[in-house]
Amino acid sequence: MFNALVMNKDEESGLASAAIEQMDVDQLPAGDVVVAVEYSTVNYKDGLCLSAKGGGLVRNYPHVGGIDFAGTVESSEDPRYKAGDKVVLTGWRVGEMHWGGYAQKARVKADWLVPLPAGLDTRQAMAVGTAGFTAMLSVMALEDHGIKDGPVLVTGAAGGVGSVATAILAALGHDVAGVTGRPETGDYLKSLGATQIVAREELNEAIKRPMEAETWGGCVDAVGGEMLARVLGQMKYGSSVAAVGLAGGAALPTTVIPFLLRGVNLLGIDSVMQPFDNRVRAWGRIAKDLPMDKLEAMVQPAVLSDLPALGADILKGQVKGRVIVDVNA
């Protein structure tokens, strides 16, 4: 038997609630590999899934959330993995369609796993988590298209994706401008390597013209919406924006002018169903390029019983950095 944070939906009200329950491996969904989970995280999607209505993401109840996890293979029907292997999983709708990391054991398809690279332990892997994995995919996409001279902008810089993107870009030698709506996070962002802090209000002002002064040599945008539209008009010629977030909304009130006259590239980053080779490449880059001392500064520890409250806090934008969940504590 093992512990899991299980969400059940009340059929009369249609609302879900979470409680720690004991489960058996036989109750887990089908899969090739059973993993003894050690750590998971709390991301924006987790907050949605933990909400009373499941954020529109949860497809079945009872449900175990947690959109990523790291742990040790306990048993495997796939020759690529054997008992004792350290693995990490992000994406593949785990924690939404398929039970995820908020349990001491998980059973998943072998194709969804990535061997943990040398230089990372399971706790560090989840200090990175889906947010950090997405941040690295964003940095890799900017590199593939060429980062221009000048500061690289990171919106939502104090959040999970933004924090890791800031640390990676700074470690690679770039000047990083971190956007935040909370002045008290300025020192935190500077500790990650940001060289300047931009108040969110500056980028939330009404757009008066489709192009402004060329300012940013690249951008990791974790917000979207009107802020992304404003940023597009400030990008340098031929630069790129790696867009990963929808917290500011799915609408994009812009024109084609930044794309036509400045050759700006808008790169959509989807961390869910990345090809295996790209997932391995990204995790290898994380182990190589993300400074572990900066990683530790981002971490807020949690246990399974903390998750309902933390899920609500992350939806309110009240969580700084990375929340890692020790599922065995």
Image (cartoon, grey):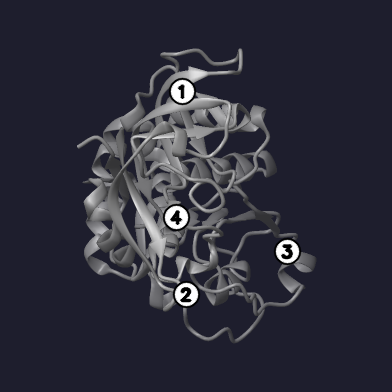
Between 306 and 103, which is closer to the camera in this rendering? Answer: 103
Checking the image for residue 262, the label placed there is 3
What distance separates the C-alpha of mark 2 from that of mark 4?
42 Å
Q: Is residue 79 above or below residue 67?
A: above
Q: Nearer the viewer, mark 1 or mark 2?
A: 1
- The quadrant of the image that shows the C terminus is top left
Kind of residue indicated by mark 2: Leu
Between 55 and 315, which is closer to the camera in this rendering? Answer: 55
Between 172 and 22, which is closer to the camera in this rendering? Answer: 22
Q: Earlier in the sequence, mark 3 or mark 4?
A: 4
What distance separates the C-alpha of mark 3 from that of mark 2?
19 Å
Neighbor class of circle 1 (other Cα within 10 Å; few <14, some 14-19, many 20+) is: many
Neighbor class of circle 2 (other Cα within 10 Å; few <14, some 14-19, many 20+) is: some
Q: Position of residue 104 (x, y in %)?
A: 33, 35
Q: Earlier in the sequence, mark 3 or mark 2?
A: 2
**Residue located beneath label 1 in the image:** 116
Q: Earlier in the sequence, mark 1 or mark 4?
A: 4
Q: Is residue 14 above or below residue 283?
A: below
Q: What kind of element bears circle 2?
A: helix
What distance separates the C-alpha of mark 1 from that of mark 2?
38 Å
Q: Position of residue 27 (x, y in %)?
A: 45, 39
Q: Nearer the viewer, mark 1 or mark 4?
A: 4
Q: Position of residue 25 (x, y in %)?
A: 42, 32
**Residue located beneath label 2 in the image:** 203
Kind of residue indicated by mark 4: Pro
**Residue located beneath label 4 in the image:** 62
